């Protein structure tokens, strides 16, 4: 499970991941690694606004990557491997 090793490394490097971030990562991993923010919100029960905030934080920390046209409605987010 590469994702959990990555999370352990992030914690070791003092890059905190809160429970909501961990849940988003867990869902991304469980669902194959690529989802839209709306799909993540549906799966987690978090609001779309909450999901997009934490996705931005995870992108900034280098935990996930974004792919697709950023202006597309169906922009997806993937676990960084």
Image: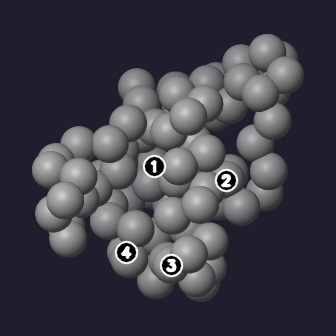
Q: Residue at x 37, y 75 (%)?
A: 39
On the question of residue 44 being in view, the answer is: no
The residue pinned by badge 3 equals 48
Residue 45 drawn at (x, y percent): 59, 84
Residue 38 drawn at (x, y percent): 38, 77
Q: Are marks 2 and 1 in contact (CB under 8 Å)?
A: no
The residues tagged by marks 4 and 1 sit, at their Cα atoms, a distance apart of: 13 Å
Q: Residues within 10 Å of mark 3 (few under 14, many from 20)?
A: some
| Element type where label 4 sits in the image | helix
For the C terminus, the image quarter is: top left
Checking the image for residue 21, the label placed there is: 2
Q: Are marks 1 and 3 in contact (CB under 8 Å)?
A: no
Residue 12 drawn at (x, y percent): 83, 17
The residues tagged by marks 1 and 3 sit, at their Cα atoms, a distance apart of: 19 Å
Checking the image for residue 39, the label placed there is: 4
Mark positioned earlier in the residue sequence (1 or 3): 1
Mark positioned earlier in the residue sequence (2 or 1): 2
């Amino acid at each position: 499970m590469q994702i959990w090793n990555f999370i352990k490394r992030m914690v070791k490097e003092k890059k905190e991941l809160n429970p909501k971030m961990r849940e988003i990562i867990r869902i991304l991993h469980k669902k194959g690694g690529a989802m839209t923010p709306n799909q993540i919100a549906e799966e987690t029960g978090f609001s779309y606004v909450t999901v997009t905030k934490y996705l931005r934080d995870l992108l900034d920390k280098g935990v996930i990557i974004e792919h697709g046209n950023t202006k597309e409605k169906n922009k997806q987010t993937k676990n960084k491997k």
